[in-house]
Amino acid sequence: MGGVHVHLKVVPGATRDAIAGLYGDRIRVRVRAAPESGQANEAVLALLAKTLKVPARQVSLVRGPTTPRKTIVVRGLDAATVQHLLLDDRA
């Protein structure tokens, strides 16, 4: 599968949606959505697409639909750009 794989640690039920830096070798992502019926997964994908400035169809979940440790794939960007937008360019 082509694209950049990004390993996440997802924290559902947070007070706001945010990329929260590194958590070990993963990127911590906080979302307001509950971990029910895929709501948190959808919120994570939407947040990443918005942060990376790509259409939602370019971001998909490839591993971990029911656990906090997830792997997503981003198509259309290189690894350096993904890292910069998710970690280096946080406000």
Image: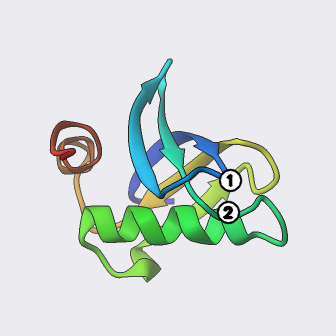
Q: Earlier in the sequence, mark 1 or mark 2?
A: 1
Q: Nearer the viewer, residue 15 or 78?
A: 15
In this figure, what is the number of numbered marks?
A: 2
Callout 2 amino acid? Ala
Q: Residue furthest front?
A: 15
In the displayed structure image, the side of residue 76 where residue 16 appears, left or right: right
Q: Quadrant of residue 88?
A: top left
Please tell me whether mark 1 or mark 2 is closer to you in this view.
1
Q: Nearer the viewer, residue 91 or 84?
A: 91
Callout 1 amino acid? Gly
User: Gap between marks 1 and 2, in whole Å?
Assistant: 8 Å
Q: Residue at x 57, y 68 (%)?
A: 43
Q: Position of residue 18 (x, y in %)?
A: 42, 51
Q: Position of residue 89 (x, y in %)?
A: 15, 45
Q: Which residue is mark 1?
A: 13
Q: Residue at x 43, y 65 (%)?
A: 47
Q: Position of residue 31 (x, y in %)?
A: 56, 56
In the displayed structure image, the side of residue 80 where residue 70 appears, left or right: right
Q: Is residue 60 visible?
A: no
What colour scheme does the image use?
Answer: rainbow
In the displayed structure image, the side of residue 2 where residue 87 appears, left or right: left
Q: Is residue 63 visible?
A: yes
Q: Which residue is mark 2?
A: 40
- Element marked by disc 2: helix
Q: Nearer the viewer, residue 26 or 11?
A: 11
